[in-house]
Amino acid sequence: STHSTHPVSYYHHAAGGKVLLGLKRKALRIVVTGGAGFVGSHLVDRLIARGDSVIVVDNFFTGRKENLMHHFGNPMFELIRHDVVEPILLEVDQIYHLACPASPINALYHFVSTFSTNVVGTLNMLGLAKRVGARFLLTSTSEVYGDPLQHPQVETYWGNVNPIGVRSCYDEGKRTAETLTMAYHRGAGIEVRIARIFNTYGPRMCIDDGRVVSNFVAQALRKEPLTVYGDGKQTRSFQYVSDLVEGLIRLMEGEHVGPFNLGNPGEFTMLELAQVVQETIDPNAKIEFRPNTEDDPHKRKPDISKAKQLLGWEPSVSLRNGLPLMVSDFRQRLFGDRKEVGA
Ligand code: NAD
Ligand code: UDP
Ligand code: UDP
């Protein structure tokens, strides 16, 4: 493998790691599983832009070719339709393992593929990493903390997950994926990285996957009421996708296994989020209360001291600055050139 010799330091030299043009090292061969999805496609954009060779492995469960079409025809880019639950042979230097039915709706109705992708899919990608000596990065989730009894959540917290709860195929699936990752690290000497991602939003998010930011934005644009679940006092911390991608790349290139929380510590209640959406899209948007789902975490906010200290990373895009970028993408996808319904 080449990554033992590839210079880890080039990010620190490259103006905060924002863009790396004029590659001086050998191009890496990188697999991104789930690369046709929301986060994965933004990650692919960055890896291609810095001059590396990228293979996306995706079964299009929630991902879309449209997210990657701008790379079609580039010899440094390849898209393979494949379910990671099945073994695959590739020769690569790095594996970013993002494939997972990630939305809350999928976790409820597609519980078998959620669980098997997290467990068998992760096992296969670790087996691949072992065979070719590649470095492996797992995108885990803040959901491993469950309904947390510690606030904000630090990486050393073991979590409060209901193993038989409605979300458990997702939560426990990711916890198992972390377990497997550390087992391969210790047992087989694989170089691994673990990111625990907190709620992330931005362009290319699935429009109808039931996550709160995509729901509120689509609802406000369609002139429908914003659906607040429960009393709306539960909190989340919302990270813009470019901040996450920066964190993932720094984690992969850095020297530390993790786990690392990657999230924006700005904490909002769902009612406050609804208000920001109103301010950004439509001050007259109505709010409608709906019963909350079972086992919904009451609050969530990352402690990112570890990523700040060891990766030199912290988010730079606030919710009020990031939301408009997502809104223009949603407007375009919902209405094409027209500005709004009835406009
Ligand atoms: P997404 O649904 O947009 O992307 C997931 C991608 O994985 C899709 O392209 C889907 O088609 C693909 N996929 C699913 N199962 C697969 C399988 N068996 N084989 C091959 N491909 C498969 O979701 P996202 O928001 O981009 O999430 C990316 C990763 O980040 C996921 O692992 C998710 O759990 C994690 N994460 C995301 C968030 C967030 O807020 N977006 C928060 C925490 C963790
Ligand atoms: N695997 C894969 N691609 C590879 C190497 C392995 O998909 O290039 C799969 C393999 O089929 C197995 C899993 O990864 O299901 C774990 O592989 P490992 O070699 O660690 O375990 P073993 O096959 O020895 O049980
Ligand atoms: N939520 C909401 N309205 C919606 C969708 C979600 O109030 O239309 C709430 C949900 O109950 C939860 C929070 O928003 O408290 C975040 O939900 P999401 O599914 O986006 O993320 P997660 O629960 O995985 O953090």
Image (spheres, rainbow, N blue to C red):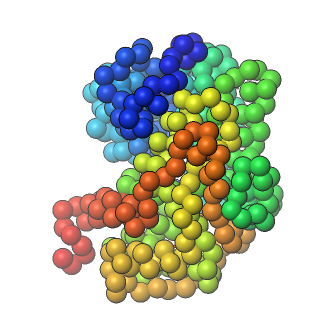
Q: Residue at x 37, y 84 (%)?
A: 285
Residue at screen point 31% across, 22% down? 22
Give the number of marks: 0
Residue 137, compared with residue 196, is above or below; it is: above
Compared across the picture, whether 128 is left or right of 70 comes to right
Q: Nearer the viewer, residue 3 or 143?
A: 3
Residue 13 x, y percent position in the rendering: 42, 28
Point out residue 185 in the picture as x, y percentages from the top left corner.
74, 27
Q: Taking the image as drawn, is residue 174 in sight?
A: yes
Tell me which corner region of the image, top left, top right, bottom left or bottom right, holds residue 264. bottom right
* Apparent side of residue 115 relative to residue 238 in the rendered image (left or right): right
The x, y position of residue 40, in whole percent, is: 47, 42
Location of the C terminus (image quadrant): bottom left
> Residue 271: horizontal and vertical position, in percent?
52, 80
Q: Is residue 100 visible?
A: no
The residue under the point 36% across, 44% down is 67
For residue 336, above or below residue 254: below
The image shows residue 200, relative to residue 311, as above or below, that is below
Determine whether 219 is above or below 245 in the image.
below
| Quadrant housing residue 309 | top right
Residue shown at 42%/14% (left/top)? 26
The image quadrant of residue 121 is top right
In this rendered view, identify the residue nearer to me: 275 or 162: 275
Position of the N terminus, as image quadrant, is top right
- Drawn side of residue 32 relative to residue 222, left or right: right
